[in-house]
Amino acid sequence: MRELFMSNPYLVLSTFVLIIVWLIFIRRRMMMQDTKSLPSVKIGNGQTIGGREEQDDYFSSASTVVGTIAILADGISGLSNGRLSSTLAVTTFIKEFLKLGDLTEVDAFFTKAARISNSEIIRQVAGAGGGTTLVAAVLDGERLHWGAVGDSVLLVYRNREFIAVNHKHTLEVLLQERVLTGEMSRKEARDNPMRNRLINYLGYDSFQNMEIGQEPFLLQPGDKVLLLSDGVYNTLSEVEMDRILSRNLSPDEAATLLIEEIERKRLKNQDNATVVILEPAI
């Protein structure tokens, strides 16, 4: 038999190819079984350009054997490459997530994807100005892993209440700290015209780091995870959002109605608005 293989290289090659194909087949079957064992996640989204000339918000989602990720980035409208920046950031995060083989590496994933995104935005805009906020949620059963930078928000809607998960990286946060130390009054902080200015975002030369949840946020049955750009939460109150989210609607139906509520207001300076809703089956 050894002599047969040695004298017929084509037989050796064919056998090798068959082994590789078989291993790939086995791996895919195992991945399919692992995916089926994961709790399903329903995802819905909605978006409006508002009163802007360009849609600078960008979002995406993906599911693997590791879990389900949803990402929302809001390109900074005051900069000339907002759309490019948000697209680059979301695309990079999805690409890096698809490489992730274990959720024990999720913190490193957030850090690495943010670093690559920041560098790539700076490289591509080449000094022309660009930047984006970003919020990312990774669901693994009842566990919510997350990372955020800028002022897009991650909320958990539970029992008709909204739980804020991340913090906004705006000057308002620093002003509130000065209020607490007695350096300024609440009125002075509230009236500061720069209070909504971003102090950290992707595509920023002085980008510091991404805020990452130190521990997974534990979800409960019935929870909805919301990713919102500022065009949503600056336009709709929690009461208005609750009126829609409290109904027995699919995530897609709820997201659509939230956007319709924004558009019905017809605000003159309505910002781009994007909502992504995740509803895990736990």
Image (cartoon, rainbow, N blue to C red):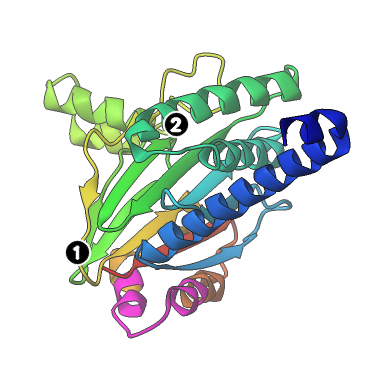
Q: Earlier in the sequence, mark 1 or mark 2?
A: 2
Q: Secondary structure at mark 1?
A: loop
What amino acid type should be assigned to the residue bearing mark 2?
Answer: Phe
**Tag on residue 220?**
1
Please identify the quarter of the rendering in which residue 2 is found.
Answer: top right
Which percent across, then down, holds residue 133? 51, 37
Q: Left of 119 or right of it: where is 206? A: left
Q: Nearer the viewer, residue 264 or 278?
A: 278
Q: Is residue 66 above or below residue 222?
A: above
Question: In the image, what residue occupies the spot 47% across and 61% down?
Answer: 276
Q: Left of 69 or right of it: where is 140? A: left
**Tag on residue 109?**
2
Spatial distance from mark 1 to mark 2, Cα to Cα?
25 Å
The chief SS type of the magenta part is helix
Which percent across, then down, holds residue 175? 27, 27
Q: Residues within 10 Å of mark 2 (few under 14, many from 20)?
A: some
Region of the chain picked out in magenta, as a range:
241-256
- Residue at the bottom extreme of this rendering: 248
Q: Left of 33 or right of it: where is 16? A: right
Q: Is residue 82 above or below residue 242?
A: above
What amino acid type should be assigned to the residue bearing mark 1?
Answer: Gln
Question: Is 253 in the magenta?
Answer: yes
Question: In the image, what residue occupies the spot 72% across and 17% down?
Answer: 127
Q: Quadrant of the N terminus?
A: top right
Q: Secondary structure at mark 2?
A: helix
Question: Is 75 in the magenta?
Answer: no
Q: Is residue 245 above or below residue 21?
A: below
Please identify the quarter of the rendering in which residue 11 is found.
Answer: top right
Q: Nearer the viewer, residue 9 or 165?
A: 9
Which percent across, then down, holds residue 255? 47, 71
Q: Nearer the viewer, residue 142 or 237?
A: 142
